[in-house]
Each structure stands twice: as C-alpha cells, then as structure tokens.
Image: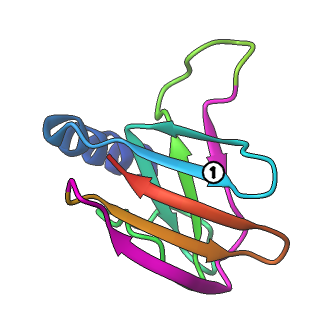
Amino acid sequence: MVGYKSKKLMKVIEEKHMRYSLVRERDGVGDSGPMCQILDEESYQPIPDEVYPRTGCGIRVGSPYGRTYSSQDYWQTTPITEIIDEWIDEDGYSHVKFKTKNSVYVWKEF
C-alpha cells in the first residue's frame, strides 16, 4: 500500500529533520518540504526509501500532507533525462542539477 510506505518514509525523514527543494531554473518555480520521492520509471509510483535523483525517474518534492486549499502540496517532474552536475556544499548537503524533457532543475537537501 503506497500511502502506508509514504507515511513510514515520512516518519524517518522527519526524525532526521531532512528537507528538500526542487526549483526549475528558467523561472524559479518549484517547492520545498520534508517529502522527496523518486518515482518509478514505469508505474510512476514512489520507490520506497529512495530520495536521490536518478536518470529515468521522476521526482516529487514538497509536503506529504495538504497544507492549504489555495497552495500546491508538492512539485513533480517528468522523467530525468540527464544529470548535469552533482556537488556537496560546504555544509555537507547534496545538490543535483538535472534535465527533464523540457526543463532544467536544481534539487537539494538541507
């Protein structure tokens, strides 16, 4: 049951106090929050316990729970076609710049 796995994963992430952001480079839109899900290539369902972007999979970042009726709860991409750059900042957090079919994004953990 996907919802159960997502809640279980969210508990682990919340305990670690990890947050993620996903921003589209051309216009700066995206989202951030405690949820990061890597979406399976075929089913587009979240892959349990995976949070790091990889080629062929989509990615969803934001909140696992509804925040407001007037705001989005997460930002989701189409499949990643290319990893452009990966680096770790001075605080030890990962950053990944990648391409999808139509956009370039920067994902980071903090």
Helix, strand or loop status at disc 1: strand
- x and y percent of residue 65 in the render? 48, 26
- Where does label 1 land, which residue? 23
The outermost residue toward the front is: 90
Tally of numbered tags: 1
Name the residue nearer the viewer: 43 or 70: 70
Asked whether residue 88 is drawn in magenta, I would say yes
- x and y percent of residue 58 in the render? 61, 68
Whether residue 37 sits left or right of residue 99 in the image: it is left
Q: How is the image coloured?
A: rainbow
Asked whether residue 63 is drawn in magenta, I would say no
Whether residue 104 sits left or right of residue 31 in the image: it is right
Q: Residue at x 23, y 59 (%)?
A: 90
Name the residue nearer the viewer: 63 or 27: 27
The outermost residue toward the right is: 102
- x and y percent of residue 57 in the render? 58, 76
Asked which quadrant contains residue 42, the reply is bottom right
What span is in magenta? Answer: 72-91
Asked which quadrant contains residue 25, the reply is bottom right
Q: Give, as a three-letter code, the residue at label 1.
A: Val
Relative vertical location of residue 92 with respect to residue 97 in this rendering, above or below: above
Q: Residues within 10 Å of mark 1 (few under 14, many from 20)?
A: some
Q: Residue at x 61, y 75 (%)?
A: 98
- x and y percent of residue 33 in the render? 44, 35
Q: Residue at x 69, y 61 (%)?
A: 77
Name the residue nearer the viewer: 2 or 54: 54
Relative vertical location of residue 60 with respect to residue 57 in this rendering, above or below: above
Relative vertical location of residue 63 with respect to residue 42 in this rendering, above or below: above
